[in-house]
Amino acid sequence: VALLSPKGRGTVGLVYLVKKAAEAGDAATALKVAQWIEPADDRAVALCRAATAQAKGGNPAAALATIKKAEGLARNLSQKDKANALIEIATAQLAAGKKQQAVATCNQALKAVQANRNGFENANAYKRLARVLVGAGEIQTVKEMIQPGKDMFSRTLNASARTSIAAIMAEAGEVEAALEWVGQFPA
């Protein structure tokens, strides 16, 4: 499968298959397919999606074992790829009921995201991190996550990310906190 799945081609299809199997609650299929995926960053993401399905299916012990595999892969990834994998690891940890571990993993991911200078990628990463942190009850951490932008482009992206994050907070029932937070920013 690795020979047929170079980055950006078949791998995307396999990761999608894992995602859909996990969403359907078929953790066994998700895990089986995840183990075939190359490169390591895509496999780590897929393993985390399988782990999330395991946790939601009532098997947190299996989920934690799968998360350990993903953590092993994440150690050797580039900064950019590591951020994505760490966010997925945190998501799976939260699903497995390990809130403190998820928050600690989000903190590691946040450092990797902030080291990346791609504003578009960061805006998406901030939203994904916010979902995990809000789920773990870390509203204040979410509010402090986005660094102030120095140029107009960064400020615009940050404003858009803040709006999305406020919506995430509101969806999780933190409406007052979301309104208070966005009220601090002009426009």
Image: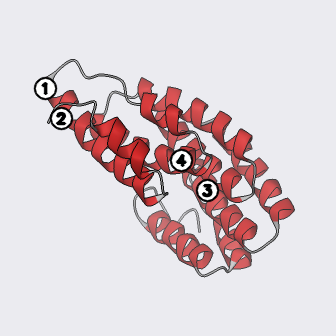
> Disc 4 to disc 2, how far (Cα)?
23 Å
Q: Residue at x 61, y 56 (%)?
A: 43
Q: Residue at x 58, y 55 (%)?
A: 45
Instruction: Give the residue at the far front of this rendering.
Output: 176
Check whether the beta carbons of the residues at disc 1 and disc 3 lie within 8 A of each other.
no
Report the residue marked by disc 4.
Answer: 134
Secondary structure beneath disc 2?
A: helix
Q: Residues within 10 Å of mark 3 (few under 14, many from 20)?
A: many
Q: Residues within 10 Å of mark 1 (few under 14, many from 20)?
A: few
Quarter of the picture holding the C terminus: top left
Residue 67 in the image: above or below residue 126: below
Q: Amino acid at mark 2?
A: Thr
Q: Is 93 placed left or right of 24 in the picture?
A: right
Residue 114 in the image: above or below residue 67: above
Q: Amino acid at mark 1?
A: Met
Task: Report x, y in % for residue 183.
Answer: 27, 36
Q: Is residue 127 visible?
A: yes
> Disc 4 to disc 1, how far (Cα)?
28 Å
Mark 4 or 2: in front is 4
Q: Nearer the viewer, residue 99 or 110?
A: 99
Quarter of the picture holding the N terminus: bottom right
Task: Report x, y in % for residue 6.
Answer: 47, 59
Report the residue marked by disc 2.
Answer: 156
Report the residue marked by disc 3.
Answer: 43
Instruction: Give the residue at the far top of this rendering.
Output: 150
Q: Residues within 10 Å of mark 2 (few under 14, many from 20)?
A: few
Task: Report x, y in % for residue 81.
Answer: 50, 40
Check whether the beta carbons of the residues at disc 1 and disc 2 lie within 8 A of each other.
yes
